[in-house]
Amino acid sequence: MDPSQFTAEPSPNETPGADRSPRGFDFDVIIAGCGPTGAMLAAELRLHGVRVLVLEKETEPASFVRIVGLHMRSLELMAMRGLLDRVREHGRQRPAGGFFAAIDKPAPQGLDSAHPYLVGIPQPVIVDLLQAHAIQLGAQVRLGCAVAGFEQDEDRVTVRTADGEQLRSRYLVGCDGGRSTVRKLLGVGFPGEPSRTETLMGEMEVGVPQEEIAPKVAEIRETHHRFWLRPFGQGVYSVVVPAGEVGDRSKPPTLEDFRHQLRAVAGTDFGVHSPRWLSRFGDATRLAERYRVGRVLLAGDAAHIHPPVGGQGLNLGVQDAFNLGWKLAAEIRGWAPETLLDTYEAERHPVALDVLDNTRAQMELLSTEPGPRAVRRLLTELMDFDQVNRRLIEKITGIGIRYDFGAGPDLLGRRLRDIDLEQGHLYGLLHRGRGLLLDRTERLTVGGWSDRVDQLADPTAALDVPCVLLRPDGHVAWIGDEQQDLDDHLSRWFGRPVG
């Protein structure tokens, strides 16, 4: 997918040709990094007419094609913006079970999602898809352009690029990965644990038949759960094997490193040859002390890193962007309530902390030591109970997240699944990134908030409550049937009414 095929178009919430950036600013928001998090954030901001520049230091996509998994919550977000069909076209659908510490249990029945599966997709493809989406909405993307420094005051951020250009923006967001330049220049602490173990990962051909590989892999995985050889077809295999020691991650491993470790763990190197790509990953676990300092914010791996067990990293970053985008846009457009932007860190920091904890737990359960192996056997038994298995799947896939919006029904603070409506499906109404009042009583109104909140009166909506107010990220901000109570919550999340 070539992003250059797309031309900039006005966003759905923007007056064509309007310059909404105050005089003296080159852009409203500059984003460092055009990975999945940065690209998604750029698109979300463009839905609200925000002038966005994305600076990406790399000029070419990664040389290796790692397959990443989009979990249920991320698939829901793609559906909310009309991207899901494109994602599924380029990915491979698989069941949602067996992710927690690679314990082989099927997903429970009746998960609270219209998309109870995972889509495996090459990382460069999802990056290109999201970048193309952002460009189509009007975002500017500059490749080969790195952030070298910045200064901020009460009104602006002045960003200096590596080639000496100075750009003025109202906000800067660091989406520039675990070694984030923005986070380091900002002086935000990144406490946690360094890598204790490392794992080699790559794609290559093998020199022995599949019928010889499968039983050997099954035997090894009884004790080494960080080990597999999975066929991709045409003789190519995905190979994962524990590394002998923590090495220099700035240098890719060699094919001989793989052969050595395969012989050490499996007693054979399976005749591996002709690698497509080779890489290594560690289990470093770190969480930024703050997500915001003044007009500079952090998202994605710039804010948190953790082992890839459970496949949560990309999903966590994309969901950060979805949470931040509409709030930052509201601040720039001038209608944000006073503390709205603060809710980004308040909501997403605890989610990241939970992901870090569950990946720590999973790494322990992958250990070959007797104690962790005993705990793994016990948890494997406990996961036969539906409630245990369900809780772990909901945790990893993100559909169990509930933000603290105060006392209320269990649905309050959760995202609403893609329910059936007279007009089709709920998520089809959320493509523009606006709030939505879904009213089964047919007597409420969004009134002076209609410039930022849509409404639909539908007594047939598949809801167990009278009415819900949805934020642009699909989370339920209010449940009830009284107009004054609704107005209070509209003010809380969408600022003052017009008129």
Image: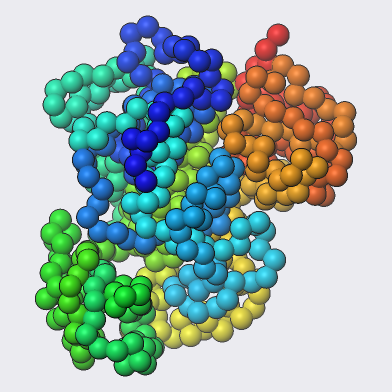
Residue 293 % position (x, y): 36, 30
Residue at the location (48% across, 11% down)?
Answer: 18
What residue is drawn where x is 41% and y is 21%? 51
Residue at image position (33%, 87%) is 210
Q: Nearer the viewer, residue 206 or 350?
A: 206
Is 150 in front, or is 10?
Answer: 10
Whole-percent x, y for residue 453 in the image: 67, 26
Q: Where is residue 137 in the image (x, y as percent from the top left)?
A: 46, 29
Residue at the far top in the pictured view: 23
- Quadrant where the C terminus sits is top right
Question: How many numbered marks are there?
Answer: 0
Q: Is residue 394 visible?
A: yes
Q: Is residue 318 left or right of residue 338?
A: left
Residue sitting at 68 percent across and 49 percent down?
418
Q: In this view, does 252 lie to the left or right of 411?
A: left
**Residue 185 showing in the rendered view:** no
| Vertical arrangement, residue 152 with respect to residue 464, above or below | above
- 44 relative to 442 in the view: left or right: left
Its colouring scheme is rainbow
Location of residue 370 by image quarter: bottom left
From the top left corner, tell me how far across and down residue 141 is, in percent.
32, 31
